[in-house]
Amino acid sequence: MALKIVKGSIDRMFDKNLQDLVRGIRNHKDDEAKYISTCIDEIKQELKQDNIAVKANAVCKLTYLQMLGYDVSWAAFNIVEVMSSSKFTYKRIGYLAASQCFHEGTDVIMLTTNQIRKDLSSPNQYDTGVALTGLSCFVTPDLARDLANDIMTLMSHTKPYIRKKAVLIMYKVFLKYPESLRPAFPRLKEKLEDPDPGVQSAAVNVICELARRNPKNYLSLAPLFFKLMTSSTNNWVLIKIIKLFGALTPLEPRLGKKLIEPLTNLIHSTSAMSLLYECVNTVIAVLISLSSGMPNHSASIQLCVQKLRILIEDSDQNLKYLGLLAMSKILKTHPKSVQSHKDLILQCLDDKDESIRLRALDLLYGMVSKKNLMEIVKKLMLHVDKAEGTTYRDELLTKIIDICSQSNFQYITNFEWYISILVELTRLEGTRHGHLIASQMLDVAIRVKAIRGFAVAQMATLLDNAHLLTGNTQRNGICEVLYAAAWICGEFSEHLEDPMQTLEAMLRPKVATLPGHIQAVYVQNAAKLFATVLRKHDGETESQAAQETSQLLIDRLPLFVQSANLEVQERASCILQLVKYIQKLQQKNVEVAEEVTALFAGELNPVAPKAQKKVPIPEGLDLDAWINEPPSESESEDEKPKAVFAKEEPKHSRSRHTEVDEKELARRREVRKQEQANNPFYIKASPSSQKVYDAPGVEHIPVVQIDLSVPLKVPGMPMSDQYLKLEVERRQKEKAERKKKEKKKKREKRGKERKADSGPESEEDITPAHQVDIVTEEMPENALPSDDDDKDPNDPHKALDIDLDKPLADSEKLPVRTHRPEALKSPAEDRDSESVPQETKKKSGKEKKKDKEKDRKRSKEEKKKKKKHKEVEEELLESQPEEAVQSEETKEAAAPPTSTSAEEVTAPSSAAAAVDTSSAAAPESEPDEPKDTEPEDTKSSKHKKKKQKKEKEEKEKKKKKRHHHHHQHHSDAGGEDSVQNGTVEEEEPLPPMSNYSLLAENSYIKMMKEDADQVYDIQGNHQDESKVVVSVIFENKSDSFLKSMEFNVLDSLNSKLQRPEGAGAHDSLTVPFQLPPGVSNEARFVFSVQSIIMPQKLKGTLTFIVKSDESSTHEKLDFKLHFTCTSYLITTPCYSDAYAKLLESGDLKGSSLRLEGINMPFHHLLARICFHHHFSVVERIDSCASMYSRSIQGHHVCLLVKTSDQTVSIDAKCDEPSLLGNVLDEIKQTFSKC
Amino acid sequence: MIKAILIFNNHGKPRLIRFYQYFAEDMQQQIIRETFHLVSKRDDNVCNFLEGGSYFEVLIGGSDYKLIYRHYATLYFVFCVDSSESELGILDLIQNMLLFTIVYNFVMQVFVETLDKCFENVCELDLIFHMDKVHYILQEVVMGGMVLETNMNEIVAQVELQNRMEKSEGGLSTAPARAVSAVKNMNLPEIPRNINIGDINIKVPSLSPF
């Protein structure tokens, strides 16, 4: 052994440490991967050694390699080993590695629960701290549930260092285990007023994080936060609180009013930019929430804007950026105050920092008005020219289009100008946004009727100069614009000056190089143009022009007929044949113009993008149903080429097909309007479009007088600029005229509407250059208003939307580790866990007070009932193995509240069964003896007494429920437990397994003993005796009342019943309850056991009084308590590596067992062994499984279970042969029973 | 909440990574690469925030996040945070707490004798050889994605106490001596005497020994 240690330390000297590894990697720049792989091999060797220092060193290096991207999850178990080292140095390394690479899917995490729990309660605060830090990174729902209570205890630790960490980690616990939020919240709230600033800051942090997601639940904390805000000097805390208020004010405007003053004070006084900025932000949020109700905050707005201007003007880019960010928030509600800083924002467009430019652009979007739109867009166009790098230029382009098209072209007064802007934008090289421009062109041309003439002229020019666009780029770039141009020219060809020329431009051979979907549009619209040309020359006999046109088409179309694109080919060949036919007719001098025009007759109306979605599904329409019987073989469907404008296509066909005469249309429209007016659910259109709806039909749209006196092409000057100039002139003229005419009238009106209108011109004063009719998009009749719910269903914070003001019901408790009955602990240990129940009691006391104030007695009673119910529940569950408790816990939480008939049951009050989950042992639950049993902790006993009083009152109500739950519990326990064992896969539902066996029975009472006695070990204390808890269910079978039950057992040398202090060795224990007829209840008795290798039998007697209406008799019942060896085993998970090591060690002695005629699925078999004999499955391969368990005195028991044809062979190994023999016998018995 | 803290050098080599949400190793590396790509192409005189964009959508899984970073000599300190964090606060945190504690801590431990070179160079070498120690410092500043402590004195004191504990246990190895030799040639002239974190003035405790 000594040699081994020496050898280990010599080895260590040659081991690489982290620094050596890093240096090595740096020295092997060329073959880094190879070097690292040898290092990993070394690390694997090191991990195999016993020396924990070597392991820790290896894990430390792995942490570094993990950072470089190497998967180190294979070493997870070694990390756990290092974590559980007793030395802080190694523990820290282990936890660091775990926090870097553990996650919810890491299976060894479940092995860490007890280790972490131990570290959390370590006397060394840094052990605790390191565990908390690590846990914060890899906490899983299971860990959160198991450790919530321990962490909550730490929130009241004496050391602030631990307190603050515990408080902070609670947020993670809440996220993973939302049920813990309500029980833990009162204490979290307390921590807001912790004397230590760090703890306070942590609490603020957690609550802010919670409140951010579900602000409404935290409104009641506002006064407390308000107090903190006015008293705290910690900027970090202040910032958090102020941010929180920002989230709360929209929900409670009164809060906002109160906040304004302290916030403005802070703004004036603070020198910390971060605080100033957050204050401004929150003031803005307040003002937004108040914007409707409060007129008198212009001073605050001014203050904010002023401060923001200072930020924006600062040379620090960060402040500038944040200033713009905050500015954009003000903009939404108070655009006026921001617009006065337009100069500053335009200046920011020149900033060298792109993110600042983009922010400024965002601001511009909100700053435009009818008045300044042209000017702003002009500035932007200048930037487009200057911009280097396509990304920023594309960003500018989209912004320009966004700005202009926002809210239905609200700010555009002159659409000719807008079309020119769009045309100018087509000159951008290499932009990706060709389709964006194109769709704008289409949109404007279709919806603004008045502009069509102008648009068509521009588009014709574009088509003519198509080579300029297609010259450089073939990809999905600017040539998309041609799609729009061709379509507009074709559809509105009646506005074309020279359709012949356009037609010629559209049929140039170069067109064939365009993308297919554009060519298709070209071909289709060439046909439209052809129709227009024919009609133009209608009436002229033997028209040369018309025939020339036909010939042109016949000459050029064959090019498209050969196109590889199906759409183009199909359209071209159709049209080609059509034209050939027309040509024949023309040669015979037949009038064809009218018929050809009829091909393209009818008006196209724009359809709202969501229209299709809003069409209600007709009754009886099932789109999934087969129309015909399904064909035997499905035909492969051709995938449609994804054209950018594919969605536009249906429009064509739709209007073409439904040709209804104008009168009918008008009639329908009237009907629909009537319907809409009467339908309260119909979404009314925006004001600008409302106007249009009022007009009774398309034909009534006022015709625009386009001022075509403007020379359209002035060399050297972009067209849009001329519009700008013109516009200014026009406005001035108009203004002068209006001043004369309408001065008085307007003044009056405006004075009423707005006080602070300082500008010389207000929005309304600017009349559009021409009366533009913006056609509203069509919506289907009786469209359904739909609100899109965008909430992410997977948001973990959704689960935390929990009402925190509701008084805490006692059913909401954190799962307490019930496996250690408190009465059995040494005093030192006691104090630690004692504080938990105490705390919960305090809370519930508080809550009750609240209740009284609210005078909600009814709900109070109900709550208490629930609480009772829960307590009983837990009490019962305590007797189960730990896993079962946990699963039951969650299960039961969801169980519906119990029947109200409980109140009718009357029974004399009796001793409380158990004060709460942690006081499990029978003696302690005696109400008359709390002082005796807990002399060391008077404080807690005081609490308990109080509580017990209350419980007495409640006693009657709860009686019945006990019974009820009992059975539920019975049947559930089996299945749940086996699943909880984790390693057993559930292939098919397991048969219910019951833990309880009959102990004794007579005509009055039945006693059931739980087979799987809960076992308690105090291994950690190295005492030579162990303790076993026996749960006995007493069921009253008679019609009489049973009371004064006393339980006694004749002690043996080996096993003794634990009696309260001061009681003699043969005194009996009072069963802490009475039993009304038909009711059952459970009591627990603690035995101390010395040797566990043999099963034990103890004789006992139960005496009780049977009380009926007439008489009362004394009765007794004898029973035998059987302690099996199984009951000394505790389910302990074991990792396969450790298991293998254990088997290799050779310390174990073997034995085996053969079972014949076992007729059950293998996983049932395993589940049974797990359940009845407290084993856990280590590994399972097909019909072979290794299992492990540990006795309360630390004996390892390993099983290898194999099955074939109804024969099960079990090879077993244990370091105590007689224990093993007995366990195997018991297993055999279990299976012989079934 | 802080989603991640990344420290890498001018070449994108990670010096410390700390994710507060699980990502597989290859994903972590991709995030580091993309982040490096984003911040490294920015000039030093532009603002220290980066937000929006497909980067966050694809990699981090949400557009609520932004990057707040600082660039010191050869190192980038990058925080990926959501909207509940104060931008300027985090910048202060990087500058005043994190960076300074790291440097301060190493000054106390390793570089006691030699103090005449650049303040910033210390960082990268520290990080290279003592990633674990930097983690321990970071753990006192940020925990589970939330800022734990902003009081410098407190951070330094706690780190000191833990290091002392480690020393009393004999430490992990005999490495410090070698580390000292590795960085013998560097030193620290201008440790700020007085760090201004907003309103809070932190007097640097007892730096006089050197």
Image: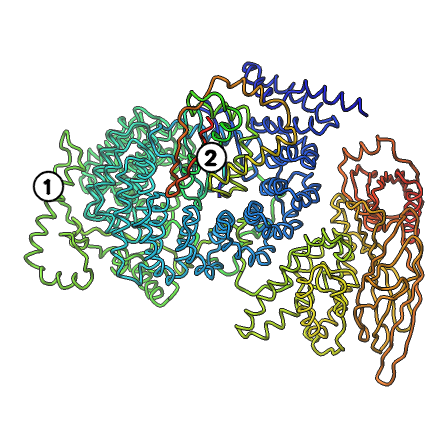
Q: Name which quarter of the figure residue A945 lies in.
A: bottom right
| Front in this rendered view, residue A942 or A553 | A942
Q: Mark number for residue B98?
A: 2
Instruction: Determine the secondary structure under disc 2.
Output: helix
Q: Is residue A405 above or below residue B35?
A: below
Please state which of the two labelled residues, at mark 2 or mark 1, is closer to the viewer.
2
Chain letter of disc 2 in the image: B
Place of residue A439 in the rendered image (x, y in percent of width and height, measured from the top left): 32, 41
Q: Amino acid at mark 2?
A: Leu
| Front in this rendered view, residue A696 or A360 | A360
Q: Is residue A79 above or below residue A369?
A: above
Q: Label 2, label 1: how many angstroms apart (C-alpha)?
A: 69 Å
Residue A1041 seen in render:
yes
Q: Name which quarter of the figure residue A1044 lies in.
A: bottom right
| Front in this rendered view, residue A907 or A636 | A907
Q: Quadrant of the N terminus of chain A?
A: top right
Apparent side of residue B121 relative to residue A1052 in the rendered image (left or right): left
Instruction: Determine the secondary structure under disc 1.
Output: loop
Q: Amino acid at mark 1?
A: Ser
- Quickly name the residue at label 1: A709
